């Protein structure tokens, strides 16, 4: 049996739990959530990294759909956009009930696997979506959101981001209260996108396991979006999971430098480097003509996983591809259909069947189950927090 066939056999038993997929935002930008125009029951490779046939081909058993909100939106506009993203996931669930199943708990994930459906969870990417309100945080949880990425690319009133100037040396007092309230709810604390000081503060405060929904190893590629070794080494004591991502500039140092230069070029043309529309793609194509793009490979992704396993241990690893959240992807990992390629690479590096079962399914299910257990214990000891940012961080908040 070839390694690729072996990988597919393993995924049939232990499918991938992917920590982060931005399909809802692409549906918003491309077609205003009109699923008649982007019917993911059929091949959408001309427009998207994700559709149902490719999810099946890739052995995906559970997906955290990102209900991402751009940092260009703030205040009530950010809250509304997050609600619209949640509604988009619900539209998908209603339209494709034979393929997708809503999952709110670890038991729901296991039930979906037994039914041959993709367990569909939601993660809110960016704490600006709660608009400094613990009541809003609770509302998102009640609507089905099971992780909150504390920041996106911009530092908040209560938390420092990895890719913005720090203002708080990590979390403020209100930021710590956000973490505690997430623990009480059973909402996973996602530390992708946050500054290392924020990671360390969250690990100090949390009473439940944390996740990194889509981050790789900073020791392998020194990008601020990746996880430092001291934080990876803290995961066994916490019980958390770091989900390696496929984003080329987080995986390959040469791609990181190319991306920096491309962002400078895009900004000079008056466009936000985070833009993903046709204008942005046109500018990137023009830049690439004069600056050939370094190509990341699935072997480079595997290098990160090897390192993360060495530092954190195999019980604390997962996968968060960031499909439909990036323009470029590594060779061999071009869509959600390509997870077997990565497993075949890891098999060739000596990863055991048991290791791969933990990487793809068991660790992610376990971390949500552990967060649920922590929430039951915490909720028995304290009720909902009514704290405000003004009370904890002073007038004007953080």
Image (cartoon, grey):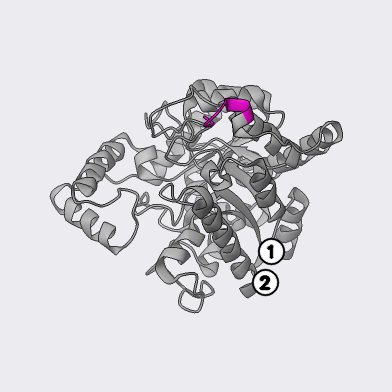
- Work out whether residue 118 or residue 267 is closer to the camera in this orientation and state it: 267
Tell me the number on the disc at residue 334.
none
Residue at point 35%, 54% (across, down): 327
Front-most of 358 and 92?
92
Residue 70 seen in the figure: yes
Residue 334's x, y, as percent?
40, 56
| Residue sitting farthest toward the front | 395
Q: Which residue is mark 2?
A: 97
Q: Position of residue 348 (x, y in %)?
A: 49, 41
Q: Quadrant of residue 298?
A: top left
Residue furthest out toward the right: 380
Using the numbered discs, state the Cα–Cα distance from disc 2 to disc 1 in whole angstroms: 6 Å
Name the element at disc 1.
strand
Could you classify mark 2 by the number of other residues whose Cα lies within 10 Å: few (under 14), some (14-19), or many (20 or more)? few
Left of 128 or right of it: where is 61?
right
For the image, the number of numbered tags is 2
Mark 2 element type:
loop
Magenta part of the chain: 391-398
Residue 30 position within the rendered picture, expressed as x and y whole percent measured from the top left: 40, 68
Disc number placed over residue 101 in the picture, else none: 1
Contact check, label 2 and label 1, Cβ < 8 Å = yes
Residue 361 in sight in this render: no
Q: Position of residue 234 (x, y in %)?
A: 60, 22
Taking the image as shown, residue 182 lies to the left or right of residue 285, namely right
């Amino acid at each position: 049996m070839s390694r690729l066939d072996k990988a597919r056999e393993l995924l049939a038993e232990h499918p991938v739990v992917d920590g982060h997929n931005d399909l809802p935002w692409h549906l918003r930008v491309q077609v205003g959530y009109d699923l008649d125009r982007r019917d993911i029951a059929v091949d959408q490779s001309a427009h998207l990294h994700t559709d149902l046939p490719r999810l099946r081909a890739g052995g995906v058993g559970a997906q955290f759909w990102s209900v991402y909100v751009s940092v260009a939106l703030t205040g009530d506009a950010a809250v509304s956009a997050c609600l619209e993203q949640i509604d988009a996931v619900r539209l998908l669930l209603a339209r494709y009930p034979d393929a997708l199943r809503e999952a709110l708990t670890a038991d729901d994930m296991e039930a979906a696997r037994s039914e041959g459906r993709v367990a569909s969870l939601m993660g809110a990417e960016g704490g600006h979506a709660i608009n400094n309100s613990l009541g809003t945080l609770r509302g998102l949880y009640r609507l089905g959101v099971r992780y909150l990425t504390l920041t996106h690319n911009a530092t908040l009133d209560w938390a420092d981001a990895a890719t913005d100037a720090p203002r708080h040396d990590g979390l403020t007092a209100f930021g710590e209260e956000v973490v505690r309230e997430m623990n009480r709810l059973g909402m996973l604390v996602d530390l992708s996108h946050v500054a290392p000081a924020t990671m360390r503060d969250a690990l100090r405060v949390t009473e439940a396991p944390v996740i990194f929904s889509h981050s790789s190893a900073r020791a392998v590629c020194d990008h601020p979006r990746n996880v430092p070794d001291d934080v990876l080494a803290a995961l066994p004591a916490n019980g958390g999971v770091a989900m390696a991502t496929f984003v080329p500039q987080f995986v390959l140092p040469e791609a990181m430098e190319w991306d920096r230069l491309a962002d400078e070029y895009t900004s000079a043309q008056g466009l936000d480097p985070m833009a993903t529309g046709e204008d942005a793609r046109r500018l990137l194509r023009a830049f690439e003509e004069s600056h050939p793009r370094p190509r990341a490979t699935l072997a480079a992704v595997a290098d990160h996983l090897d390192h993360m396993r060495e530092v954190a241990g195999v019980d604390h690893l997962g996968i968060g591809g960031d499909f439909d959240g990036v323009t470029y992807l590594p060779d061999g990992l071009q869509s959600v259909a390509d997870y077997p390629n990565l497993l075949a690479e890891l098999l060739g590096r000596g990863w055991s069947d048991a290791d791969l079962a933990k990487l793809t399914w068991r660790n992610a299910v376990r971390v949500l189950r552990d967060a649920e257990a922590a929430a039951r214990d915490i909720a028995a000891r304290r009720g909902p927090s009514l704290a405000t940012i003004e009370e904890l961080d002073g007038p004007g908040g953080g």
